[in-house]
Image (cartoon, helix red, strand yellow):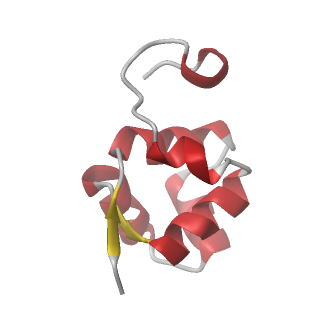
């Protein structure tokens, strides 16, 4: 399977914006919490994993390809 390389901060932003802790999202997505932490540190995940993240966090897939490098991104969330 092909691996995507996304911005780790965007992946974390999507999860946190949806109100999930790492373990909560992992349970919902049926993966180990270590896997979620790995995605959020490397930005590497498959297209299917990205689709699942987008679905459960109610994040448009296009947002996952953006860079989070400024305060105020997507409604005032800053990292």
Instruction: Write the residue at 67% across / 47% down.
Output: 59
In percent of width and height, residue 35 lies at 38, 70
Q: Quadrant of residue 1?
A: bottom left
Instruction: Write the residue at 53% across / 62% down.
Output: 23
Instruction: Write the residue at 42% across / 29% down.
Output: 68
32 or 13, which lies in front?
13
In percent of width and height, residue 60 lies at 67, 48
Q: Residue furthest left?
A: 42
Instruction: Write the residue at 36% across / 52% down.
Output: 6
Above or below, 55 against 11 in this view is: below
Above or below, 43 against 74 in this view is: below
Counting the numbered discs, the total is 0
Q: Quadrant of residue 25?
A: bottom right
In percent of width and height, residue 51 lies at 60, 67
4 sits to left or right of 53: left
For the C terminus, give its image quadrant: top left
3 sits to left or right of 58: left
In percent of width and height, residue 42 lies at 25, 55
């Amino acid at each position: 399977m092909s691996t995507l390389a996304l911005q780790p901060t965007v992946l974390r932003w999507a999860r946190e914006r949806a109100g999930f802790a790492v373990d909560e999202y992992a349970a919902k997505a049926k993966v180990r919490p270590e896997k979620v932490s790995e995605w959020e540190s490397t930005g590497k995940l498959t297209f299917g994993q990205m689709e699942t993240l987008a679905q459960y966090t109610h994040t448009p897939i296009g947002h996952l390809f953006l860079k989070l490098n400024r305060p105020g991104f997507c409604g005032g969330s800053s990292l």
